[in-house]
Image (cartoon, coloured by chain):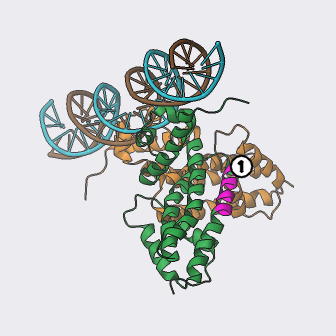
Chain colours: A green, B orange, C cyan, D brown
Amino acid sequence: MPPRKRADAVRNEQTLLAAAAEVFVRSGVDAPIREIAAEAGVGMGTIYRHFPTRADLVVAVYRHQVEACASAGPSLLSTSDSPFSALRAWIDLFVDFLVTKHGLAGAMQSDSSGFEALHGYFLDRLGPVCESLLRAAAEAGEIRGDVRPYELMRGIGNLCIGRDDDERYDPRRLISLLLDGLRL
Amino acid sequence: MPPRKRADAVRNEQTLLAAAAEVFVRSGVDAPIREIAAEAGVGMGTIYRHFPTRADLVVAVYRHQVEACASAGPSLLSTSDSPFSALRAWIDLFVDFLVTKHGLAGAMQSDSSGFEALHGYFLDRLGPVCESLLRAAAEAGEIRGDVRPYELMRGIGNLCIGRDDDERYDPRRLISLLLDGLRL
DNA sequence: AACGATACGGAGCGCTGTTCCGCTTTGTCA
DNA sequence: TGACAAAGCGGAACAGCGCTCCGTATCGTT
C-alpha cells in the first residue's frame, strides 16, 4: 500500500477542479491551461501532474460537477423561498454543468464506451435529484405535475447544444421561458 | 463588372485545392496551414488570401472533392478491367473524401444549416454515380443486385467514423471485407 | 516598353501545449 | 523537537501553431 497523498496535493486537486469548472463555463473546455492555472493560483506543472491529459481533467471536472449538482439539489430545497425557486437555481447550476458535459464528447475523441459509462452515471445520479425538485414544486402547487425529470433534463440539454459564440442565441433565456411554462 | 482574376491566381487556387485534399487525407483537416502551403509550394499568405478562414478552405475542398469523385465514376468504369474493380477504386477515392467530409462538421461549428445544404449536395451528386457503378457491376454478374447506393455509402461513411490515431482500427480493411461480401 | 494593379512569400508576433528541474513543503522518525 | 528524504510545486524555456503585414515579383494593359 503506497503512502497517503500529501495534504497540499489533495487541496490543490480540489482547488483545480473548482477552478477548471469555473473556467470551462467562462471560456469553454478548450480554455488555455494557463488560464486554469491562473484561476486556481497554481503553476502549470501542477495541473499536468494531477491530470496528464486534457481529457483526464475534463472527466474529473465532470464527475465533480455531477456530484456537486446532485448534492446541491436537497440543499437548495431547504434554503430557498419555495420549491420552484430551488428548481430554478438548480437548473442554473445544471446549465453550467452542461458546458463541461458537451465538451466531454470532444475531449474523449477516442473511447466512446467510456463516454457512455459517464453518461449513464450522469443519468443515474441526477435524474432522482431532478425528480425530487420537480415533485416538491408540484406538491407545493407551483407547477404542473406531469413533467418527467428525464424529458426536462434532456430538453434543457438539447437547448444548450450549439456554439456559444452565436450572439443570436441565448439558451438560458429559452430555458427560463420553458420553466415559466411549467407554472400553474 | 470587376476585371477577371489573374491567371496565376486561378492556377494557385486549383493547386491549393489539390494540395489541401492531399494533406487532409494524410494529416486530417486540422493539419497546419504551413503544411498545406508547403505541399502546394506557395506561401501562407496565398492561402489566407484565397481562403480567409479554415472553414472556407475545407468547404472549397469538399465541393472540389465531390466533383472529382462524381466525375471519376464514369471514367473509372470505362478504364477498369471490370465494373467491380471500378467500384473498388471509386470507393477508395470516396474514403479519402470522407476525411474531408467528417472534418467539415467540426470546421463549420456554427452554421449547421450550411452544413445540411452541403450534405444534400453531396447526396444528390454522388448517389447516382454510386448507383451506376453498382448497376454496372450487378449487370456484369459480379455482385448481388439488391444493394442500394444510399445504404452502401452510408455504411462506408459510418465505418470511417472514429479517430484515425487508433492503431487497432483500420476502416479500409473492413470496407474491403464488406465489398467482398457483395460478390456473387 | 512601361506602369499600375494584383498577387505572392515568408519573417515576425503572439498565443498555445508541454517539459523539466531547482526550490519548497510535508510527513516521518530518531 | 529537529532534521532529512520524498513528494509536490512553480514557471522559465522550448516548440509548434495561426495570422498579419509589407517589400517584392508577376501580370495584363496601354
Query: How many numbered marks, from 0 up?
Result: 1
Identify the residue shown where x is 42% and y is 50%: A27
Question: In the image shown, does A89 or A156 lie closer to the viewer?
Answer: A89
User: Magenta span: helix, strand or loop, mainly?
Assistant: helix
Q: Is residue B102 above or below residue A12?
A: below
Q: Please say whether residue B60 is visible from this viewpoint.
A: no
Question: In the image shown, does B151 or A81 lie closer to the viewer?
Answer: A81
> Mark 1 is on which residue type?
Ala
Q: Is residue B154 above or below residue B68?
A: below
Residue B12 lies in the magenta stretch:
no
Left or right of A13 on screen, residue A167: left
- Image quadrant occupied by the N terminus of chain A: top right
Q: Please say whether residue A62 is visible from this viewpoint.
A: yes
Question: In the image shown, does B77 or B57 lie closer to the viewer?
Answer: B57
Q: Chain of mark 1?
A: B
- The magenta span reads A113-125
Identify the residue shown where x is 49% and y is 43%: A15
Residue at far right of view? B184
**Residue B30: % across, % down:** 51, 42
Left or right of B152 on screen, residue B75: left
Residue A124 lies in the magenta stretch:
yes
Left or right of A74 on screen, residue A19: left
Residue at which label 1 appears: B86
Identify the residue shown where x is 60% and y is 47%: A59
Question: Label 1: few (<14), some or many (≥20) within 10 Å?
Answer: many
Left or right of A98 on screen, residue D11: left
Identify the residue shown where x is 44% and y is 68%: A172
**Residue B6: % across, % down:** 31, 44
SS state under label 1: helix
